Image (tube, helix red, strand yellow):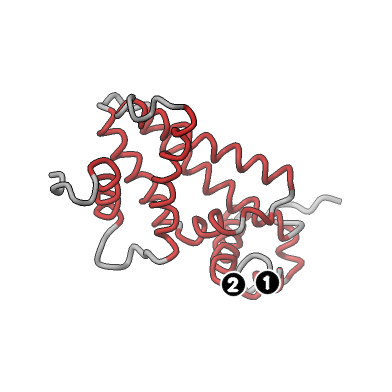
Amino acid sequence: MTRERSDNYDEKKELILRKAAALFAQKGYEVTTMMDVAKACNASKSHLYHYFPAKEDLLYAIVKEHTLVLLNKLSQVQAMKAPARERFEHFVVGFVEVAADSRNEQLVLTKELSFLPPAKHKEMLAMEVQLVEILTGLLKEINPKRMARAEIQGPYALLLFGMIIWTFTWYKKSGKVKPAELASHIADIFLNGFCAPRAQ
């Protein structure tokens, strides 16, 4: 017999995802148990299993939901009617702000993706490729000569993603440098170089 959903099913599910993301980010996916997540939620393991039948389902939900938010945000930037450099700056700001608002989820996506089953891992990699393609398109518009060789396009895009993604292993938006300012510095250094005068 199918168990009926409670009125606050979605709220409880989101709570589980937030608590699990925090634990996976702090302790690592491999050593975190479903009991750890249940305790963090002040719930029983059976309560968790009602929402997520296995720990890998939790991981999949966390990384997929976070990646979809990124894709939605950055696809909107791609569709903007603005010069390429301006869209690039919006791209960096958008990514940094989403990651700053969901730091635990970003860390899980960065560090724990390999624990997904092969089919789900492949699905997530395909979504990440979409992000790379959006950025690659912008870089081609900004500097078509530098991006002329197909084999260098991916590395240039991944250099920027590396600057952004690994920043969240130490950066917290509660510090003195806020996400928008950090994003502005990243975009400026990537496009103009560290020794160039600061873009206004």
Would you name the residue on which mark 1 appears? 31
Residue 175, by quadrant, is bottom left
Kindly identify which residue carries mark 2.
27
Res 52 label: none
Residue furthest right as drawn:
1
Point out the image quarter for the C terminus.
top left
Q: In this view, does 178 lie above or below 35?
A: above
Q: Where is residue 138 in the image (x, y as percent from the top left)?
A: 36, 30
Estimate the x, y position of residue 167 in percent, counting from the top left.
Answer: 39, 59
Amino acid type shown at disc 1: Val
Indicate the quadrant where residue 136 lies: top left
> Badges 2 and 1: C-beta atoms under 8 Å apart?
yes
Q: Residue at x 54, y 61 (%)?
A: 18
- Density class for disc 1 (Cα within 10 Å; few <14, some 14-19, many ≥20) is few
Going by the numbered disc 2, the residue's amino acid type is: Lys
Residue neighbourhood size for the residue with mark 2, other residues' Cα within 10 Å, grouped as few (<14), some (14–19), many (≥20): few
Q: Is disc 2 placed on a helix, strand or loop?
A: helix
Q: Which residue is drawn at 35% across and 39% down?
A: 91
Q: How many labels does the image show?
A: 2
- Which of 100 and 188 lies nearest the eye of the viewer? 188
Q: Position of residue 168 (x, y in %)?
A: 42, 60
* Residue 95 location (% of width, % of height): 39, 46
**Which one is in front, 84 or 195?**
195
Q: Is residue 140 left or right of residue 83?
A: right
Identified at 30% across, 39% down, the residue is 90
Q: How far apart are marks 2 and 1 (CA)?
A: 7 Å
Looking at the image, which residue is at 54% across and 71% down?
26
Disc 1, SS: loop
